[in-house]
Image (tube, rainbow, N blue to C red):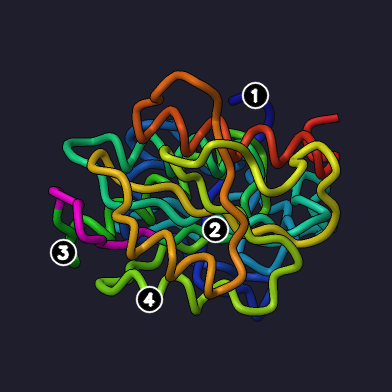
Amino acid sequence: MSGRKRFFVDNITSREVVLDGEEFVHAKTVQRVEEGTEIILLDGSGKEYTAIVSKVEKRSLTANVISSADGDKEPETEIYLMCGALKGDKTELVVQKAVELGVSRIGIFSSEFCAAYMNGNKLERLNKVSREAAKQCMRSRAPEVIYFDKFSDALSSADGFENKLFACEFADKSERDIGGLGGSTAIIVGSEGGFSEREAECAQGAGFSSISLGKRILRAETAAIALTAVAAFALGELK
């Protein structure tokens, strides 16, 4: 990551901002931020605040905001990726790459053939990965990662999206031309075990179109990243 160091804070309501917690530890021990350093503060609003560090203490630092501007790296079209929980650190990989590709929201869900599990600590870790990826690729917002323990709830969370794509390993052909996408897009990709026929029917009932990813069976993490990239390109986010 080049340029001024970037850090997330809860909110910015005055010109004097205190950075503490994990972001402070990262600033002090990893980024070696000192008094007089110019940094960028992000509060999730889409704005970027340029600030000068005025004081570095044992557990926090204080910075004075000198200017603000709208971030220019956020996607113009909303992309919502939903992925079945994956084993090991594969879910973290999917979150990281999805943020880099420009998704606005990320949902992780449990399904019939899902062999991984999720808890509060894992979800907190995924949101940390989202923040770190957002800083690395110069975004102004870190997409929130949410968890659904019911597949039906994940489907319902996509209500209102103009396009709904369901990656189905047993689909003979795609029901939508991804190259012609336009407007907000929700994507669903399964876990290592894939989806059951019943879940595919539920997705179709919720307005999702089955999408084939070709004749080769992709790993779940590959499918999630690849379909997100293709959709982002079709929507103009990678041009």
Q: Is residue 114 on the magenta stretch?
A: yes
Q: Earlier in the sequence, mark 3 or mark 1?
A: 1
Other residues around mark 4 within 10 Å, as few (<14) / some (14–19) / many (≥20): some
Residue shown at the point (46%, 44%) measured from the top left: 168
| Residue bounds of the magenta highlight | 108-116
Taking depth in this image into account, of 204 and 25 the one nearest to the observer is 204
* Label 4 – label 3 distance at C-alpha: 19 Å
* Label 2 – label 1 distance at C-alpha: 21 Å
Q: Earlier in the sequence, mark 4 or mark 3?
A: 3
Pointers 1 and 4 in contact (CB under 8 A)?
no
| Residue carrying label 2 | 143
- 59 sits to left or right of 130: left
* Label 4 – label 2 distance at C-alpha: 22 Å
Determine the secondary structure under disc 1: loop
Determine the secondary structure under disc 4: helix
Marking on residue 119? 3
Pointers 3 and 1 in contact (CB under 8 A)?
no
Marking on residue 209? none
Pointers 4 and 2 in contact (CB under 8 A)?
no
- Of the 4 image quadrants, the one containing the C terminus is top right
Amino acid bearing label 3:
Asn
| Mark in the foreground, 2 or 1 | 2
* Label 3 – label 1 distance at C-alpha: 34 Å
Amino acid bearing label 1:
Ser
